[in-house]
Image (tube, coloured by chain):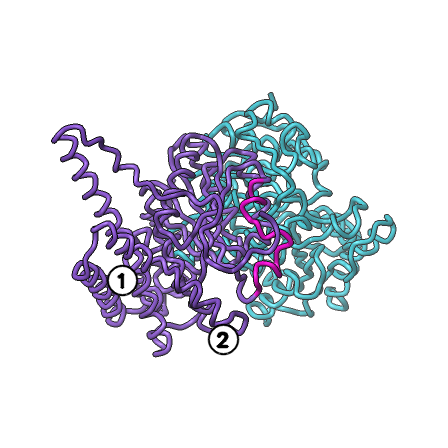
Chain colours: A cyan, B purple
Amino acid sequence: MNNVSNASGVSKQTKLTYREALRAALRDALAADERVFLMGEDVGKYGGAFGVSLGLVEEFGTERVRDTPLSESAFTGMGIGAAIAGLRPIVEIMTVNFSMLALDQILNNAATLRHMSNGQLSVPLVIRMTTGAGRQLAAQHSHSLEGWYAHIPGIRVLAPATLRDARAMLAPALADPDPVIIFEHGSLYNLAGELDGGEGPVDLTSAAVRRSGTDVTLITYGGSLPKTLAAADLLAADGIEAEVIDLRSLRPLDDATIMASVARTHRAVVVDEAWRTGSLAAEITARITEQAFYELDAPVGRVCSAEVPIPYAGHLEEAALPQAAGIAAAAREAVGGHG
Amino acid sequence: MTGTRKRTPKAEPGTVKAVPDTAKATPDTAKAAERAARADDAVAKHHSDLLATMLLIRRFEERCVELYSAAKIRGFVHLYIGEEAVATGIEAALAPEDAVVSTYREHGHALARGVPAASVMAEMYGKSTGCSGGRGGSMHLFDVRRRFYGGNAIVAGGLPLAAGIALAEKLRGSDAVVCCYFGDGAFAEGEFHETANLAALWDLPLLLACENNLYAMGTPLAVEHAQTDLAMRAASYGMPAWAVDGMDVLAVESAARRAVDGIRAGHGPHFLELRTFRYRAHSMYDPDRYRTKTEIEQWRAHDPITALTERMRNAGELDEATYEDLDARAQQEVARAEAAAESAPVEPVGDLLRHIHTEPAEAQP
């Protein structure tokens, strides 16, 4: 048995990885509710493409941990149908790039059925998928398209960036009567550390201030959080105190936490691994100019991926992605002469 | 068996002869004769019900054409006229606890399911009394109380959804069958093939009701399918599949009963290719340049309502007055639906953003 599988989830300081935290959440969910089942490509014996569900089929059987054919559209749509009919499916799609094959079902059914049916249908579905680059997987396994999903009314979009969120977001996502997509950043699976168990359940709506600071607000999420915290360390060495906000929820966005921070620091940089054009970073920047324009002492900065399909070669991939040095440079520019 | 199908509405090989299963009494005794008479009455009543449903669908849609021209109804409107035997025959084989997933050509499916004409008409008027509160329109009729899970206007988009409902029924151990309607156009979509494979793989209680009306919008069957024998292709997924004369309501009902019985007996998904024809264009926007008048007239000669009416007359089950009465009732129901839709309120604009997420009062544990 896993060492964090007690019913209350997290009870004490436990050393584990992001992957193990996700697995423990799945195990709890399967144990807690007969209606919950996990469905996706190779989630059974293989243990999931990234090893998240390893061991669960042995524990819960093939009815509850279902291997599917390579039919993203059909098994995602079946998750929607099963949810409508009263079950609580968790659908795993290997990567966000592959989720394009299921986008029809997610957009045209999951996000839409409640409204189109005038509130007659609920779709209590959770979809999990891997997103992001950093593992030299090239241009069909590495993109960050969560901003596209965050564009769609009717779904909640989550990006756990910490062990605690990886461990605790699934239960409230399953309790949500509407569809929820959880983006697991591929570079975080081996993130290891202590799980702080003293905080109780997490909410799915608020952003979190991961580091307090007074000089500039760095707004990020998912796999860019560790890089942004590293940038804040670099800045601190220069005497610049950066506040780091982890969005946690990409839809809805927690405007209040962002604006309160900007009101303190008067400078903001958005760090987003997606492409800049038409991005979540663009949306956040627009909201800051709409809601906190007169608080700003400098233009809002953005650090995004280069507008290129993510290349294979390590040095090119690294150059294409936001990195701590580039984030720190953007923050220094925002602070500028006033810093 | 293979190759391009002739576009004439002949009964196809594999068509199941209509044998009403209630008429089986042996006239050995007076009691038996009485039973037989009662059974005949029951058969006649059943035929009359089927005729009434087809007439309701026909009259409803004929009025829709007029109301569309009068700009009372807007958006896309896809008419089912000519295909009434399909929904009517299949619905006769389904139970209320069964579920239905439909397409954008769905008025007939909804009416046959028992969704009140008034709530369908109000929906087409965009009124708050519509079955989707005016948020769906002609293509998105929902009535969850009757297990009618909507018109899906993404071709083949309803198939995975229906399979998911079927999975839930199976996991719950219920007896319910899920019927998913789709067309020959959807058969070309990946979602059909993904779903057929998964449904067969997992033995789901799913009736795949393929309404082959020979045209995917304006593209003829032979121009979109290398192999036009759809039932044969469906059978390759390892499920019972056969073609049915979709212009013969009794043949449809009989085939659907056989399929539904098989599904309920745990034999997994079944596929029916219902060979049918829409007399009207694809939608009210379509000038119908791709079909000849001759072709349409050939199919009209096999009209499902006329066919059943003649069969009932020949069997002494229907006289002219009774037919006129059934037709008048259908027209009256449509007229009442229209009047109610005319006077119904619209949703307040203040409610525009409702039903995007579950409201606290609606949340179920």
- In this view, the residue in front, A336 or A194, is A194
Looking at this view, is B319 or A224 the one in front? B319
Q: How far across and how far down the image is residue A35, in percent?
A: 45, 34
Question: What residue is shown at x 38% (from left), y 33% (from top)?
Answer: B175
Q: Residue at x 51, y 41 (%)?
A: B241
Residue range highlighted in magenta: B219-235
Say above or below: A209 vs B117. above
Along the line of sight, the residue nearer the viewer: A62 or A142 = A62
Q: Amino acid at mark 1?
A: Ala
Is B220 covered by the magenta stretch? yes
**Subunit that carries the residue with mark 2:** B
Q: Is residue B328 magenta?
A: no
Q: Earlier in the sequence, mark 1 or mark 2?
A: 1
On screen, residue A307 versus residue B140, left or right, reads: right
For the residues beneath circles 1 and 2, the answer to whether they share a chain is yes
Q: Amino acid at mark 2?
A: Pro
Q: Residues within 10 Å of mark 2 (few under 14, many from 20)?
A: few
| Mark 1 lies on residue | B118
Which x, y percent locates residue A78?
52, 43
A88 or A117, which lies in front?
Answer: A117
Q: Nearer the viewer, mark 1 or mark 2?
A: 2
Q: Which residue in the rendered view is the most extreme toward the top?
A: A1
Residue at x 57%, y 43% (from the top left corner): A75
Whether label 1 touches label 2, CB < 8 Å: no
In the image, which disc is placed on residue B287?
2
Looking at the image, residue A26 sits to the left or right of residue A311; the answer is: left
